[in-house]
Image (cartoon, coloured by chain):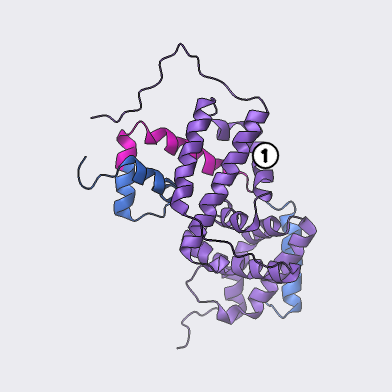
Chain colours: A blue, B purple
């Protein structure tokens, strides 16, 4: 292992930060390099990626967006909104 | 310093704040849970935003600003205290998730989060999370806010966002995996099959 390479423990601790795009470019590259060669960590990454994707897919949109927009604009206009 | 933007105040509000109405509506629905209450919350959010538009810093994240107003309005009107909880160790939660994965894998639930029946329970599981964790999960996982913006919306340090988010995610994983087990979706590995080699390549 080179001095700059991360060990599995360090990668596991930062996996969600990595998936969330919250790591510095250098740290992100180090995690990515580790995942590319580690048969222990890559399945964990795959599992977590499916999980966060599933969470994002559960987003619930408003059933009647146009009606809501009309209502909000009417309320704003009553406050003096004129655009 | 006078603004170089030729648009009027109302035009800037129309162009910069109103496009976020669908996102605010989603967030309001997640907070209020009932559509009628959520609609009231959306309306109140945009009214407050319009009245205080001069306080919005041009160039900053308008959606995060609106989410903060929405959240503050919701908790103030609902009379619910925003609970302050102990700051858990986010790194431990991340490591806990690794243990969960190992357990799920041994039960043949490696793909549990890709199954249709799991997907059907995700929303209910999120709605049943304790508030501090649910708040972080809603903002980061459903509304794609950065940790930094989530921290501003929730008015907590980034470390708190991270620890609440990670704990919320681990709680969700536990519940969804438990649900899959209860539903009989466990597949035990064939003992005659050689386990996969997990050592790193040289």
| Residue at the disc numbered 1 | B121
**Residue B159 x %, y %:** 46, 61
> Which residue occupies 76% across, 65% down?
B40
**Residue B57 x %, y %:** 51, 77
Q: Does A78 appear in magenta? A: no
> Which residue occupies 53% across, 40% down?
A51
**Residue B156 x %, y %:** 53, 67
Under circle 1, the secondary element is helix
Residue nearest the viewer, comparing B134 with B15: B134
Residue nearest the viewer, comparing B198 with A62: B198
Please state, as top left, top right, bottom left or bottom right, where the N terminus of chain B lies in the image: bottom left
* Above-or-below relation of B72 to B28: below
Q: Which residues are magenta?
A: A33-60
User: Label 1: how many residues lie within 10 Å, few (<14), some (14-19) or many (20+)?
Assistant: some
Q: Residue furthest top?
A: B192
Look at the magenta stretch and give its main secondary structure: helix
> Which residue occupies 34% across, 38% down?
A35
Q: Tell me where residue B170 sits by quadrant.
A: top right
């Amino acid at each position: 292992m080179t001095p700059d390479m991360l060990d599995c423990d360090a990668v596991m601790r930062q996996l969600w930060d990595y998936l969330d795009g919250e790591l510095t470019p250098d740290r992100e590259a180090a995690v990515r390099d580790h995942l590319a060669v580690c048969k222990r960590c890559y399945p964990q990454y795959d599992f977590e990626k499916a999980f966060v994707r599933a969470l994002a897919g559960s987003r619930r949109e408003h059933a009647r967006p146009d009606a809501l927009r009309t209502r909000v604009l009417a309320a704003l206009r009553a406050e003096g909104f004129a655009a | 310093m006078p603004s170089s933007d030729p648009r009027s105040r109302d035009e800037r509000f129309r162009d910069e704040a109103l496009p976020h109405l669908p996102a605010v509506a989603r967030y309001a629905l997640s907070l209020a849970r009932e559509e009628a209450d959520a609609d009231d919350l959306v309306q109140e959010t945009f009214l407050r935003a319009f009245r205080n538009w001069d306080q919005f810093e041009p160039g900053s994240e308008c959606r995060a600003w609106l989410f903060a107003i929405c959240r503050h309005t919701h908790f103030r009107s609902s009379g619910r205290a925003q609970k302050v909880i102990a700051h858990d160790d986010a790194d431990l939660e991340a490591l806990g998730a690794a243990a969960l994965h190992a357990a799920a894998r041994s039960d043949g639930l490696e793909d549990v989060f890709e199954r249709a029946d799991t997907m059907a329970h995700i929303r209910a599981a999120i709605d049943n999370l304790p508030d501090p964790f649910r708040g972080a999960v809603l903002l980061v996982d459903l509304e794609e806010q950065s940790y930094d913006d989530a921290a501003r919306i929730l008015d907590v340090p980034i470390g708190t966002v991270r620890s609440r988010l990670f704990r919320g995610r681990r709680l969700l994983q536990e519940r969804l995996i438990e649900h899959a087990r209860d539903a009989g979706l466990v597949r035990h590995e064939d003992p005659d099959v050689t386990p996969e080699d997990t050592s790193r390549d040289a």
